[in-house]
Image (cartoon, helix red, strand yellow):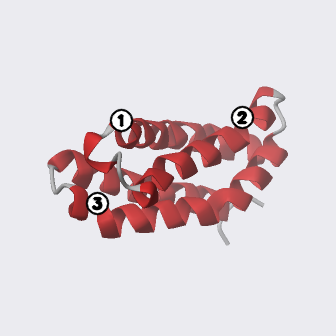
Amino acid sequence: MAELLEPRDAVAQIEPLLAHLWMVRTFLKHAEEIQDSLEMLEVPRNLFDVIRATEPALQNGDHGRYIHKLRGKMGRLREARDFLSAQYSVYSDHTNYQMAARSLDAATKAIEAVLAKCG
């Protein structure tokens, strides 16, 4: 049986992953190629929503609430990942978009793995 993570330890592992998501969000938010696509602009908005949802709990040191809020936002994170992975090449096949899609996928999977170990 795998050892469970305490919420405090899970948050410590997740925070750097959210920093990766923030950088993907920032790249997409300012990418000229997607500015006319309301659907693609939902990706950075969803990433913003996911990340910011955890901030009050983090600031209050409420790790259990942080995990709860993040679990509640994982559907939006997966949707953003899936949409970006499937659609980025419609706008540009540049390496920046490829890497953004890979980064979002890897961070999402890593967050899921941490949450799976959290009781």
Q: Nearer the viewer, residue 56 or 114?
A: 56
Residue visible at 25% across and 47% down in the picture: 33
What residue sits right under mark 1 in the picture?
A: 30
Asked whether, in this view, residue 24 is left or right of residue 96, the answer is: right
Q: Is label 2 or label 3 in front?
A: 3
**Secondary element type, mark 3:** helix
Residue 79, given in percent of the width and then of the height, sits at 52, 66
Can residue 1 be seen from the camera position used here? yes
Examine the rendered structure and indicate whether residue 45 appears above or below residue 19. below
Residue 4 visible (yes or no): no
Rendered location of residue 113, percent (x, y): 56, 61
Report whether 99 appears left or right of 80: left
Name the residue carrying label 3.
88
Name the amino acid, label 3.
Tyr
Residue 41 drawn at (x, y percent): 44, 51
Image quadrant of residue 57? top right
Of the pair 71 and 28, the residue shown nearer to us: 28
Can you give x and y, in whole percent of width and height, for residue 90 in the image?
Answer: 23, 64
* Residue 28 sits in quarter: top left
In this view, 90 is above or below 18: below
Q: Secondary structure at mark 1?
A: helix
Q: Quadrant of residue 55?
A: top right
Instruction: Pick whichever, 35 or 99, lies toward us.
Output: 35
The residue drawn where x is 40% and y is 59% is 105
Q: Residue furthest left?
A: 94
Mark found first going from the N terminus, 1 or 3: 1
Q: As shown in the figure, which amino acid type bears the numbered disc 1?
A: His
Q: Residue at x 41, y 66 (%)?
A: 83
User: Residue reaching furthest top?
Assistant: 59
Element carrying mark 2: helix
Residue 78 circle label: none
